[in-house]
Image (cartoon, rainbow, N blue to C red):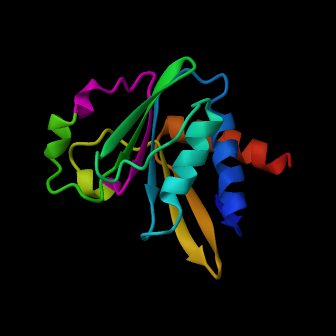
Amino acid sequence: MNIELVTPAATDRFGRRLAQVFEGYAGGAVITLAGELGAGKTALARATIQALGHVGPVVSPSYTLIESYELPGRRLHHLDLYRLADPEELEFLGIRDICLDSDLVLVEWADRGAGFLPATDLAITLEYLGSGRSAHLEACSATGRRLLAKLHDLTSCT
């Protein structure tokens, strides 16, 4: 699935739409966000986290590597692994404490945590497209296929 994100407002709308996918969904999911620096990964994560009900600022985990949010009915973990020196550091950050049955996980620069991250359900790649961006979404599991189908239904309704 491909989505054009012509403006930053379009990225925010896409983040809100992504959050809608999780309405009524109690399970966990791992979503990776890939793309060059400045492609909009953190902006998309921020819009999604806020749309899921977080009140207050959403800070980039560029230096802390992980920020966790208590949302209505679930937890969300936002990881930014750009500065990760060694994937094994994820053990010290508590990667095994994440409840994959119910927690949502958004991971930027997931390739840097290879071998220590849980399996990806939905991979989102953001790319520059002229003065805007495009998002390519790929389901990587049965959960990812269900989420992508719901997102497709929501997107085609507007």
Q: Is residue 47 left or right of residue 154?
A: left
Q: Is residue 86 left or right of residue 71?
A: left
**73 w.r.t. 48: above or below:** above
Looking at the image, the residue that sits furthest to the top is 73
Q: Which one is nearer the viewer's eye here, 128 or 71?
A: 71
> Which x, y percent locates residue 124?
51, 55
Q: Is residue 6 left or right of residue 146?
A: right
> Which x, y percent locates residue 45?
52, 48
Residue 99 figure quarter: top left
Q: Which one is nearer the viewer's eye here, 57 or 22?
A: 57
- Which residue is rendered at x = 21% and y = 47% of the image? 115
> Which x, y percent locates residue 107?
40, 47
Q: Residues in magenta? A: 94-110
Residue 1 figure quarter: bottom right
- Which residue is rendered at x = 54% and y = 71% of the image? 127
Looking at the image, the residue that sits furthest to the front is 56
- Which residue is rendered at x = 57% and y = 20% of the image? 72
Looking at the image, the residue that sits furthest to the bottom is 130
> Which x, y percent locates residue 122?
50, 46
Q: Is residue 108 magenta?
A: yes
- Which residue is rendered at x = 21% and y = 54% of the image? 84
Q: Is residue 101 magenta?
A: yes
Q: How many marks?
A: 0
Residue 3 figure quarter: bottom right
**22 w.r.t. 3: above or below:** above
